[in-house]
Amino acid sequence: MTILQIEVEDARPVAAQCDDSHLIVTLADGRVLRAPLWWYPRLLSATPARRAVTELSPLGVHWPEIDEDISVASILRGAKAPGATEPVPHNG
């Protein structure tokens, strides 16, 4: 059995942003985490302007205008928000 241990200082977010399809979080040690935006329905349904307002903490990111909190550990685990479902691609 493997246990993932995260050094809090190294895994501290120093930047967070969303594009049209991803959440991108840059960590203090230089790693860049990228997760599908559909994993976080509140972020996905928010306007780009509201997604741009973030507060960083040692353990994650908070969007005060959306009332959303996402930890670095949950992104690393691949933990999706409850009820998150992958969108069906549109053909045509």
Image (cartoon, rainbow, N blue to C red):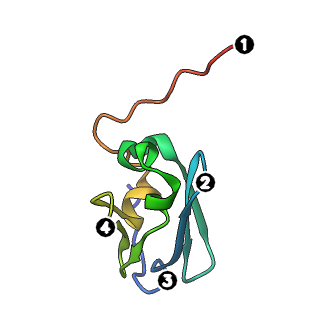
Residue at image point 35% right, 75% down: 59
Q: Find the residue positioned furthest to the top.
A: 92
Residue at image point 53% right, 21% down: 88
Decide: is 71 above or below 77. Answer: below
Q: Which residue is mark 3?
A: 10
Q: Residues within 10 Å of mark 4 (few under 14, many from 20)?
A: few
Residue at image point 44% right, 57% down: 75
Decide: is 89 above or below 35. Answer: above
Q: Secondary structure at mark 2?
A: loop
* Quarter assignment of residue 85: top left
- Work out whether residue 78 or residue 43 is closer to the camera in this orientation and state it: 43
The amino acid beneath tag 4 is Pro
Which of pointers 4 and 1 lies earlier in the amino acid sequence? 4
The amino acid beneath tag 1 is Gly
Task: Please tell me the numbered disc located at residue 19.
Answer: 2
Q: Secondary structure at mark 4?
A: loop
Task: Please tell me the numbered disc located at residue 92.
Answer: 1
Give the x, y percent position of residue 20: 60, 47
Decide: is 60 above or below 90. Answer: below
Assess whether mark 1 and mark 4 are in contact (beta carbons under 8 angstroms). no
The amino acid beneath tag 2 is Asp
Q: Which residue is mark 4?
A: 64
Structural distance between the alpha carbons of marks 3 and 2: 24 Å
